[in-house]
Amino acid sequence: VVDPVKDQAFYVKPNEQGPLVITFKSAFPRLVTIGVDQPHKWKFPIYLENRDAIKIETDYAATNRFSGKGAMKAEVLFRDARAYIDADLKMDVENMSANDLLKQFTDVADQSIAFLEANKQKVSPVFYKEQSIKFKYGSLGRQLGVPIYLKNWGGRKLSTVIPDGYWDLAKGIKIDDQLLSNTGYTEFMSYSYISFLRLKTLADQGMLDSTLSIEQRTELDYNLIEKNYTGKTRSLALSKTLESGLNRAKDVTVFKPLMDKYVNQYATPEDAKQTLG
């Protein structure tokens, strides 16, 4: 069991009657992950709110049944996770077109969104609002990630795996600091969107298939975030970019000018503390 209120995963065993009973206290709502190693590796997230009592019946594979208070939230998350796993298993990343992968990602996301909407009255308003945002940005993140996905997993050149209409996918994206409490938004803004902006810049320069050093990539990402982001979202994204660069660079001193600029001009106290370690 992975619980955000604990420092590390913990393990539990069935009681004498067979069922596995786990009781969580305080700090609701929160997302925990439950999984097993035997007889098959298996895991999925559970969204917990006060007084939830979710019963899970499982064959430790593809079949799970949820009942009790809070069950529909578990069903929404399980269906979404299962759909992406099934889609991944069917992918031929070495041969499928970028258009086909984009459609596949979009179809899976649309199904999850539609299921949530159809069961809006069966979940709490808090869960519905949070998950709607996560589904929106998760879907967009996967769409923007199509070229990188086919490059990394299919060994393809980026210039050959840009889907039709790809450069228009990010139109209408707005920076909204009010969404910083939502991990779907923060992950999208910290990774997916900046990756898209980098690809767009390289494509405009005719350098889409070029290889950037960690130092070059970090500086480019920093400049793009500085230009396209605002407020606390900019502080967070710059922090994540600098952390990544510092963790991978051979000579971290090359980042001192960027670090100084970040701390002096953009960083929130919390982000500065985390970045400086």
Image (spheres, helix red, strand yellow):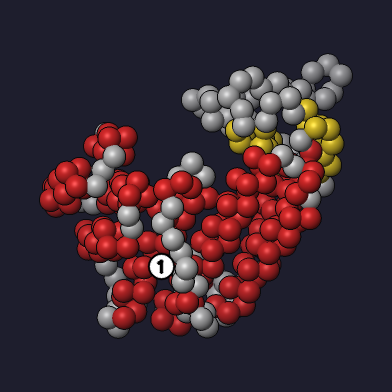
Give the farthest residue toward the right: 17
The relative height of residue 26 versus residue 227 in the rendered view (above or below) is above
The relative height of residue 123 versus residue 217 in the rendered view (above or below) is above
In this picture, residue 84 sits left or right of residue 137: right
The one nearer the camera, 58 or 181, is 181
Q: Where residue 252 sits in the image (x, y, percent)?
A: 18, 47
**Residue 224 lies in quadrant:** bottom left
In this picture, residue 76 sits left or right of residue 102: right
In what element is the residue under mark 1?
Answer: helix
- Quadrant containing the C terminus in the rendered view: top left
Q: Where residue 265 sits in the image (x, y, percent)?
A: 19, 47
**Residue 15 lies in quadrant:** top right
The relative height of residue 159 versus residue 117 in the rendered view (above or below) is below
Residue drawn 84% across the image and 23% down it: 18
Question: In this rendering, does residue 64 appear at all?
Answer: yes
Q: Where residue 140 sits in the image (x, y, percent)?
A: 54, 63
The one nearer the camera, 148 or 273, is 273
- Quadrant containing the N terminus in the rendered view: top right
Q: Residues within 10 Å of mark 1 (few under 14, many from 20)?
A: many
Question: In this rendering, does residue 259 appear at all?
Answer: no
Residue drawn 68% across the image and 37% down it: 46
The relative height of residue 126 versus residue 23 in the rendered view (above or below) is below
The tally of labels here is 1
Residue drawn 66% across the image and 58% down it: 84
Residue drawn 32% across the image and 63% down it: 228
Q: Which residue is mark 1?
A: 196
Q: Where residue 216 sits in the image (x, y, percent)?
A: 22, 63
Q: What's the amino acid at mark 1?
A: Phe
